[in-house]
Image (cartoon, helix red, strand yellow):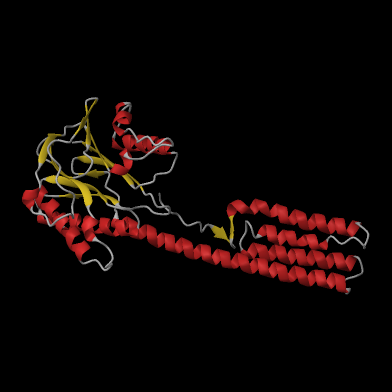
Amino acid sequence: MRVSPDLTRIGGETRSSRALFVVPFAIILAVTLTDLTTPPSVHLGPFLIAAPAITASFAGAGGTAVVGALAVGAQVVIGASQGGLMTANHQAQIVALIVISGLVTSFRYATDRHRRRLSQVRSVAVAAQEVLLRPLPERIGELMIASLYLAADEEAQIGGDLYAAVRTERATRLVIGDVRGKGLAAIGDAAVLIGAFRGSAYRNLSLPGIAAHMGSAMCWNWRHIADDERNYLESFVTAVVLDVYDDGPVTGMVNCGHPPPLLLHRGEIATLDVGEPAVPLGLEVPKERDYQVETFRFEYGDLLVLHTDGVVEARDDVGAFYPLRERLAVWRGGGPQALVDYLHADLLRHTGGVVNDDAAIVVIARCP
């Protein structure tokens, strides 16, 4: 969902709109020829205003001004050919055409200026969002990674869901999480959690240690947030933190109230819901002993699917949830990116192209 400013303009007009100039030119030519061949008592000159008005709908201020000038010139030719250029009627038509063409050109200039500013704002927003939620690398350590992020808010690339990956001394560490709520407040909370996760990479904390560190960061942030009306006691983040170790097909996991990952192993699908999940991050000041590491095998050829509840809680037009496990069962196979592309298309097909909550998917494969 990248926002790309539409700035491919020459003189204010897009290349695709050049062919449309045939329409105002045809109007000017048709009105002029018709008025020259009809009796002087018939005045079609007022129809010339349609030319700059139509031009303003697809061209820039420069193109609109040019067409307006041509329309005024055509009105002058009509008046001169009929011998009534100095009459009050023709002069009034010329003045009216000049004034209206000027107004239309001014409005078009203001619109173009607003669009340029909006494009700049969008570009800054895109850059800021990409800093907060950096794209996951396609390859890190022994892992191949593909990811998908669908934001519920229009014109946004991120929301309250998050993911990140870093390298530690002997493993690749990943996190996927979901901040309660959505909108700007959720984006801020997600940024705090991602910052705590990335900032701890050099410390080589244990999985319980990193979970406690992120939970403490969220508690501190909510207790010292500037918005006094916000009740931090009702805020929390669900998350799964993984260590995919380099020295064997074993992966460690700490689940903090998050939907469990799914493991695709030799055509079978397993839900990694072993053990009792810890409480979500931020509900209380945590300690390392509050978190228990669960281990499972993650072999070459396996695929690990991490997701947020925005995926499994996405509804169709009759209110049915998205059946992630069932859709994975009918997938024909491939690598992480192929699976992400499949789930992306299938999820949008299920929801009719619109998601009502932020949704994130990360697919991991171990490859030598």
Residue 135 at x, y percent in the picture:
30, 50
Instruction: Please say whether residue 106 is visible from this viewpoint.
Output: yes
Question: Relative to 5, is 306 above or below?
Answer: above
Q: Residue at x 18, y 59 (%)?
A: 219
In the rendered view, does 91 fall on the left or right side of 106?
A: right
Q: Quadrant of the C terminus?
A: top left
Instruction: Please say whether residue 147 is visible from this viewpoint.
Output: no
Instruction: State which quadrant residue 265 falls in.
Output: top left
Residue 269 at x, y percent in the picture:
23, 28
Front residue (pair 284, 13) = 284
Identify the residue at the far left of this view: 289
In the rendered view, does 246 fall on the left or right side of 122?
A: left
Instruction: State which quadrant residue 352 falls in.
Output: top left
Residue 31 at x, y percent in the picture:
82, 57
Q: Residue at x 87, y 62 (%)?
A: 43
Q: Residue at x 19, y 45 (%)?
A: 257
Q: How many marks?
A: 0
In the rendered view, does 175 fall on the left or right side of 360?
A: left
Front residue (pair 148, 79) = 148
Question: Relative to 146, is 185 above or below?
Answer: below
Instruction: State which quadrant residue 252 falls in.
Output: top left
Q: Residue at x 9, y 42 (%)?
A: 293
